[in-house]
Amino acid sequence: MTGSSSQDGSSKRGARNNEDELGREVRRLYDVQRIPPKAQVKLEETYAALRTTPQNRPGSQPAASTESRNAREGVGRHAPVRRAVPARGKGRAPRVVKRGVVVAVAAVLVVLLCGTAFAASRLLQMQPGETGFFETGGNLPVYDSLKPGVSSLNAPVGDTVDVEGVQVTLDSVSCDRNVVNLFFTLTKEGGFDLAEQSNYEGSQENEWSRLQRLSPRFGYALTSNGEAVGTGSVNLLDAYREGDAVKVMQRIVPETTLPDQVDIALEGWAPWAVDAVNGKPSFSLAVGMDLSTVAQPRELGAQYLVFSTSEGDKTIGIQRFTASELGCVMVVRNDNAWTGEPGTEGSSYGPPDNVLSPHALKVVDDQGNVLTPVGAGDGSGGTSMDGPQVIEFANLSPDAKAVTFSPMTSIDWESLSVDERKARNEANVQHVDVSQVGAQLPTSEYGGYELTGWDVSDGTVSISLEPYGWQANGSYMELVSEQEATLLESTWTDPDTGETGTGYHSGIMYRKRDYLTGAFVQMVSYYAAQDEELRGLTQYSYLSAFDTYREETDAAQTLSF
């Protein structure tokens, strides 16, 4: 979740339900099945603002589970802290959220009414060369694996737009049939004042975290010879400062394989723009690409698989499974459905009993590599509840000629009593000392992680993990500190009532993955805690899923590229 304050589990479920309800209401009002990408960008930015609500004075209650397992990978959010539930009438958090939802609706409606047409003036061909992003070494090390592919397939662009005193330059594009990487430079006379990008007054989050807030967000539309190819939101991966300029890397993972000719229309939302709070797009960019010289990816083709499991037949509709130099992508038909009336108590959204979730697939190539799902970066994924599910995989061998899909069926949670569920969850809380590099962090009987690094610098704790085997929770992994760090205190006023409240905040969390190996880094940039204190906070916990899944090897199916 992007930039959200940590809250207890029930609060987060309520926030997620509010998001789903808001999206449904927007689609209903405008009679559309899919929210336009530029609207989705702003909608998710506004969700981030809604989640940035002050926390209350921490009490003696233990930290609750901090994020839904369906949360998007790699997205920055506030790290968990212990908190006490306020007395009714104090702080009025529900009123603050309600006011924010009204603002969100207004912002989305403004964006929906803004239409912009794009046209690329020239077609670019991919060729070997430098992008100007990886050459200085300022990028996050977890993205070093992207450099070889990007260096062999890219094209310089050099188009610049001025957005209220900030020059946004699309430096280059690196693209094959599977993935599009975009590289930007932001410049401003006199440089950027990153103090303006802090989450709270007096907070000391590191420079990298502030650059994520500064970076523009984009909605995209892909066309080919005038025909629509796809729409969505561009994912923010990385940003760093080079002198007075800011370098930014973003990524598009389209639902379809790209044709020989494709035009990319970008509509940007600039956080520094005067109308940013109203959700208005600030600028536009467009680029056309000739991919006729780019090799077609290895692909399985569309597949409708039926697995004969111990729980009966389970189906999954794979619209495409393609592997290329820049990435491995699986697109799955969205068969999810609501049980009960959406938005009502007891209703849920997910796959029916006869449909297998893509996160319940173990995928192994014919070289013996277990594929690891990786999230497409930090940005708004633009995922529609009605659209297909797009998943990237790491660890596919370049020599692989086939992959095997094994269904992983899980226990029936509905059949368990409350006490049984509680006991099972408590048994799956694992503990680790992150200073013990080399330690194993199993997440189930089928796999886990090896702790490969722990670093404390600039008020930020970075924990590096290397996956092994099958990841029971898909791309979800979160290490939670069991020791409390110094909190930042802030005050806020409800403009509707004039009431004031005090919030206490720990830090903001980001999670990133290596697209080649699946290696994982969790970074928490703290608002007030100093390095010396943070080096003493080595006790962490995480949730595993033992005695939860069963590999249905007899139902496995192998498909060849």
Image: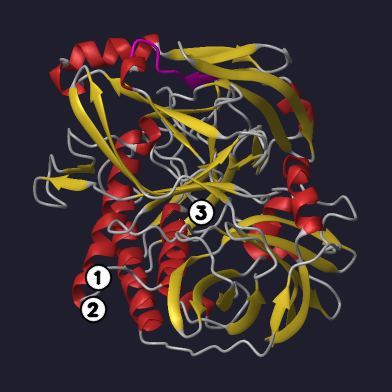
Q: Position of residue 326 (x, y in %)?
A: 66, 51
* Relative horizontal placement of residue 517, taking residue 431 as reference (left or right): right
Q: Which residue is painted at 20% across and 76% down in the image?
A: 29
Q: Nearer the viewer, residue 283 or 213?
A: 283
Spatial CA distance of label 1 from label 2 is 5 Å
Spatial CA distance of label 3 from label 2 is 38 Å
**How many numbered discs?**
3
Spatial CA distance of label 3 from label 1 is 36 Å
Q: Amino acid at mark 1?
A: Arg
Quadrant in the rendering for residue 28: bottom left
Task: Assign the magenta stretch its main secondary structure.
Answer: loop
Q: Which residue is denoted by mark 2 in the rendering?
A: 30
Label located before the other in sequence (3 or 1): 1
**What stretch of residues is rendered in magenta?**
541-548
Q: Amino acid at mark 2?
A: Tyr
**Tag 1 secondary structure:** helix
